[in-house]
Each structure stands twice: as structure tokens, then as C-alpha cells.
Image (cartoon, helix red, strand yellow):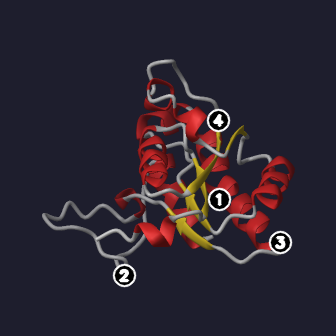
Amino acid sequence: MIDKNFWADKKVLVTGHTGFKGSWLSIWLNIVNAKVYGISLPPQDSNSLFCLSKLEKNLFANEFIDICKYEPLKNSIEKIRPDVVFHMAAQPLVFESYSHPQNTWLTNVQGSINLLEALKSSERVCSVVMITTDKVYENKNWDFSYRENDRLGGHDPYSASKAAAEIA
């Protein structure tokens, strides 16, 4: 059961809030009366869930910031002073990682480090949930799910960058 009292009036920052999963999370957080703040790149098209749901009007703040740029990210976090952070901002596509490996590594690794550094320098203590993927694990082609104690790995830029973010 979800405790709406826990989330009520909590300042919750969602990075990647314009993406599909980030939009759904932001919608859910609004339902439980959290104060939702979003940091993300702008949505890629007008048919995104973010645009179609008109999510922007339900946010306490909506900032289009590239997490690879430390100072704007840090300044935003200092203004928001979140209680909880859901880090969903990433370059999430395996095929895209082959075309643009540098951007994939920069976003998935350095962007995650930037977020953690900005939070570390903040005066406010908060909880952080770092969203990841099963692609961080060495692919064994098993018929069962991976576990947190399985070996990290990945041969494509996306998988390797997400594993590196885990290590960082």
C-alpha cells in the first residue's frame, strides 16, 4: 500500500521527467500530493507523454537543464532543496549508443556523477534513487533475472556506461 501521507508535500526532484517513465513517475507523484520538480532535456516531440499529459502545468518547477552541465544543475538543486531525488535522466537507447557513444558516456556516467556531486555539496540531506537497467550486468543469456551480486558488464556503449555509473 502506498502511504500518501509520506509523499504529501515532499519536495521530489525527478531528473529525466520529460521521458516516458519519468513522466509516468511525475504523474504518480502528483497523485500522492508530492511537490514535483523536474530537470530534463526538452521533450523530443509534441506526442510525448510529457506534452500530451500537459505535465508541465502540474510541476512546482520545470527546468530544461542538461545534467552534463554541472553549474546549472547544482544551482537548480540548491534552489529546490529536494527531500527525495529520482534520477532517471539518461541516454537510454542501446542502438543510439552505437551512433553516439560519446554522448551516451557523457550523459550516463558524468551526468550521474554531476548529480551526486551537486547533492553532496547541498546543505540538505535527501534520499536518492538511481534508476538503472538490467543491461548493467554481464549478459549470460540466462532464463532467470539478474541479481545485484551478479557481475557487471556490457559490450555496447549503453550497457558499459550504465555499469560505469553503477561503479561511480
Residue position marked by numbered label 2 in the rendering:
149
Instruction: Give left or right: position of 96 versus 133.
Output: right
Q: Amino acid at mark 3?
A: Ser
Please report whichever mark, 3 or 2, sits nearer to the chain's N-terminal start: 3
Of labels 3 and 4, earlier in sequence is 4
Residue 35: image location, x then y, percent: 60, 55
Q: Earlier in the sequence, mark 2 or mark 1?
A: 1
Residue of label 1 = 112
Say which amino acid is labelled 1.
Answer: Ser
Disc 3 designates what residue?
A: 121
What residue is rendered at 70% in x and 67% in y? 116
Earlier in the chain: of badge 1 and badge 3, it is 1
Between the residue at mark 3 and the residue at mark 4, the CA separation in whole angstroms equals 23 Å
Which tag is nearer the camera, tag 2 or tag 1? 1
> Which residue is rendered at x = 58% and y = 69% of the image?
128
Task: Answer above or below: position of 129 versus 76.
Answer: below
Q: Nearer the viewer, mark 3 or mark 2?
A: 3
